[in-house]
Image (cartoon, rainbow, N blue to C red):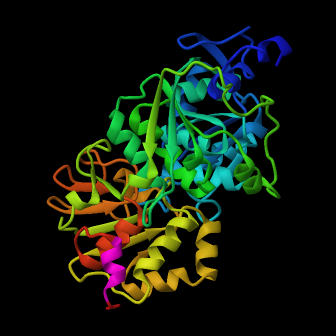
Amino acid sequence: MHTWRRSLAHTLAEKILLAHTDADDVAPGDVVMVRCDVVMANDVSGPIAFRALEKMGVQRVFDPGRVVMVADHFAPAKDARSAELQRRLKQWSEAQGVTFYDQGRGGIEHTLLCEEGWIRPGSVIAGGDSHTCTYGALGAFGTGLGSTDIAACLALGEFWQAVPSTIRVEFTGDKQPFVTGKDLILAVIGRIGVGGATNAVLEFAGEGARALSVDERLAVSNMAVEAGAETGLFPADQTVADYLHGRESRVQGTVPGDLASDDDAAFARTLAIDLAGLEPLVALPHLPGNVVPIAEAIGTRVDQVYIGNCSNGTMTDLRQTAEILRGRRVHPDCRAIVVPATQRIYREAMREGLLDVFVEAGASVSTPTCGACFGGHMGVLAAGERAVATTNRNFRGRMGSPDAEVCLANAYVAAAAAVAGEIVHPADVLAGAPA
């Protein structure tokens, strides 16, 4: 980036975009062409993009070293049609010489790419999945694109982007027991609504944001899109540096020198949330913005608990789940499904004995998959059933029948609901004698 361009005041998002475009400067509303450090797609979005590439007459991707394909949505394949999608993904990847993570060798794309060194602070990731915003946890501009735009990225290595404004979210104070990153982002969405950050970026700052682990930052950034945001960014700090230390860097992108917003940068809005007064939250059906304190959801009957997915299938989530389930049993009128986000997390949970805790409690443990989160398979709901899930969306029909209901909550709350068969405060479960 030219020195004089750095001398102007910019938000973190503007700095990253400016480093990946030929524009002299950027401001909210400008439309610029943005170079990709990584292009990612999966077994749903990938094959659609491949057909678009064929129609465009494109034979080869712009740079095989910057393209990643992940089989995660229908992994393992649920039927012949989904098996064909995965075969198509694998064959195309082999023909193009791009990196391909097959089932049993990777996991859910967004957690996986962070683990595998594809995401670096200041990089730009174009993903064929709406939750590509997850990469903002590491200070990267990840944004979800439709399959036609992904095809253009595969061909040209760039995409058009309307420069977003930035909403600064300041988390102050210390988190209370049983409050996690999930509750922080639910608090934001509950405050501004599911469209409150449209055409904007959410930037998370303040002492409360700095205190979050990378796992919790992943949960926060992951649901930025549920507020309509392009992405959800944390400034890259020592916590991010420690996470990346020792991980192979698979990309050599252009990164700005200062990975934080300038003090005099212009923000569209500043939102302050005091964590000291925040309790566990629940998003009731059928919107992620239908957020209430857990006290207002107590007693809600639950048929299924689903713990996992790209927002909350980390080791942090699994340890929180085990803390509640250890020595207890899943309620006889409820079923529980636990889904580690990646093979690496699965194996770490196995080494720690967490999988034994889950199975002993009567829960099912799944291979890493997007599965039931998007209503695909491996845990979908029947009409009239209700789930508490650590997933990111609870739209009508999202996890199965349109007559089912999904409540979103953190892993503590979900695990406690599995034990009680209804929504309860996790502290109440721990206060009782193990079953």
Q: Residue at x 58, y 59 (%)?
A: 107
Q: Is residue 352 left or right of residue 376?
A: right
Q: Is residue 430 magenta?
A: yes
Q: Is residue 210 visible?
A: yes
**Res 37 → quadrant:** top right
Q: Is residue 195 left or right of residue 404?
A: right
- Residue 239 spot, x, y in % from top left: 70, 53
Q: Is residue 191 left or right of residue 234?
A: left
Q: Residue at x 44, y 54 (%)?
A: 276
Task: Give above or below for 148 relative to 326.
Answer: above
Q: In which quadrant will I find the C terminus?
A: bottom left
Q: Is residue 421 magenta?
A: no
**Res 39 → quadrant:** top right
Q: Decide which of 114, 371 is in the foreground and name it.
A: 114
Q: Is residue 34 left or right of residue 318?
A: right
Judged by its main secondary structure, the magenta piece is: helix
Q: In which quadrant will I find the N terminus?
A: top right
Question: Residue placed farthest to the right in the image?
Answer: 3
- The span shown in magenta is 426-432
Q: Residue at x 22, y 68 (%)?
A: 302
Q: Is residue 87 visible?
A: no
Q: Residue at x 72, y 29 (%)?
A: 60
**Res 227 → quadrant:** top left
Task: Give above or below for 298 relative to 51.
Answer: below
Q: How many marks?
A: 0
Q: Decide which of 10, 91 is in the foreground and name it.
A: 10
Q: Decide which of 93, 231 is in the foreground and name it.
A: 231
- Residue 357 spot, x, y in % from top left: 47, 85
- Residue 323 spot, x, y in % from top left: 46, 78
